[in-house]
Image (tube, rainbow, N blue to C red):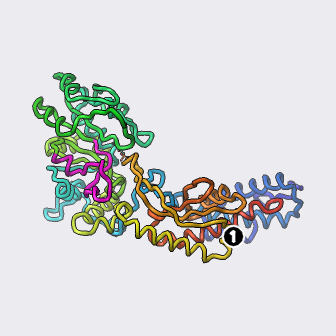
Amino acid sequence: MNLRNIPAIDEILALPRIEDLLKLYNRDFIMRILRQAVEESRQELRLTGGDYSKENLTEKIMDRLEILLEKASQGTLQKVINGTGVVLHTNLGRAPLSNRALGYLNDMGRNYNNLEINLESGERGSRYRHVEELLITLTGAEAGLVVNNNAAAVLLGLTSLARNKEVIVSRGQLIEIGGAFRIPEVMKESGARLVEVGTTNKTYLSDYAEAITENTALLFSAHTSNYKIVGFTEEVMLGELVKLGQERKIPVMHDLGSGILTDLREWGLKDEPTVRESVESGADIISFSGDKLLGGPQAGIIVGQKKYIAAMKKNQLTRALRVDKLIIAALEGTLLEYLSGNPLENIPVLKMLTISPEELQEQAEKLRAEICSKQGTMREIEAISVIKTEDMIGGGAYPTHKIPGYGVQIAFKNNQLEKLSKQLRGMNPALLIRKQEDKMLISVRTLLEGDARILVELIEMGLLRAGEEQGPGGKL
Ligand SMILES: *Cc1c(COP(=O)(O)O)cnc(C)c1O
């Protein structure tokens, strides 16, 4: 080993190969990555104790530099193929968008648009009017407003209607969602005073009624979407709460979590009320996410009575929580699909949830056959079969609900799974799989168009790399 043979940065910078790279990449970027390449080569030399001439090392560093530059210039946000069978995966960006939403997004992103101008009068318009009519039509509410996400929607609702006043919530609904959204914390942030009633498993209407004082501004009901209490439970129906609110002249806010616009009971999804049902129950303000079961971009949608929505629009906080034109475009495109398209077919999340088991089985068989057709891959495979899977909705909805699906289960020789799944995560696109009893499981429900073909190539490449990794003495 001879660390002194590592060339100095200045020497490398004088090379003609650097000149070529300067045509492709930003100079500071090359400098940063070059230091990384040199450092990595130094570490490797220490580790392997190899003996190389200066020319040899320079070439190695340059090769490494080129690879690292190409990789780093691809950006950090990258495509992931979701083989987990979890449809709404918060870590994977929740809902993939429909073509209609993407078309709108593309068109409005590359052009000027009428975001805040009334083209009829030529005067200033509101960005919020673009989706409001659609929301009214699709939910039956009087008015609507869109902000950054549902957490923001809840915060805005509480601040606008209950700042320095009391909000009554059942102890069974003091939930935390996605690690960061906690009802009691949001309540504190909003300046509203939380009044807890009932117990974790049982809350009665009388609990709410007895807690009402002259300072009560809001009755709050949260859909406990990411957990379920089973056993002896008692929850007040939204309709009953609304009746109490009307009697005592106190508005009811319903945090629905997942904003579902179409009835999916036929597909076995029974526990989630639609937004329209919440409106019909008489809730005064209803909030939900744009990127859960609605299948659109991240957004917090608020619908309800006009006077409350108007109060929220006037709140200064709305300016800080406002949505960008791209979000409005993607949301409008998504909602238009509900209005005049075929949401169950064209909105990916809904398609994934309503696809028939027969179709999934067929897809899984096809995937299996495709993997089997790759000779190189087959050498490493001990067994491969199509099996039934338990897929999940995820994203804070239907916690206990498993959807029966199909997938391809692969057992590899030499316990390669751990290495392989790491390799698969490191590729671009990356592939996320499920592990089950030391076997790889790829659920086909969450594969999007074209994913299956790429996936086969990724596995092939991953096996190759995992094999190299464990080759004799490791490879430089
Ligand atoms: C998911 C969820 C939220 C948070 O919504 P985001 O859009 O992720 O901010 C709030 N309340 C409930 C009941 C939820 O399910």
Q: Is residue 280 visible?
A: yes
**Which is nearer the eye, 462 or 97?**
462
Residue 268 lies, in percent from the top left, at 32, 55
* 43 left or right, relative to 66: right
185 lies above or below 306: above
Q: Quadrant of the C terminus?
A: bottom right
In which quadrant of the rendered image does the N terminus lie? Answer: bottom right
Question: Which contiguous range is marked in magenta?
Answer: 255-280
Element class at badge 1: helix
Estimate the x, y position of residue 279 in percent, counting from the top left: 18, 47
Q: Is residue 5 left or right of residue 306?
A: right
Expressed as whole percent of the image width and height from the top left, the position of residue 64 reads: 72, 63
Instruction: Tell me what residue is drawn at x 31 percent, y 56 percent.
Output: 294
Q: Is mark 1 within 8 Å of ligand 1?
A: no
Q: Residue furthest left?
A: 247
Q: Is residue 217 magenta?
A: no
**Label 1 crowd bin: few (<14), some (14–19), many (20+), radius 10 Å:** few
Q: Is residue 452 above or below residue 143?
A: below
Determine the residue positioned at 32% across, 29% down: 171
Query: Which residue is tagged 1?
Result: 19
Q: Is residue 108 visible?
A: no
Name which residue type carries label 1. Glu
Based on the displayed image, in which of its 4 quarters is residue 102 positioned? bottom left
Q: Is residue 187 above or below residue 436?
A: above
Would residue 258 be counted in the magenta stretch?
A: yes
Where is 402 relative to 239, above or below? below
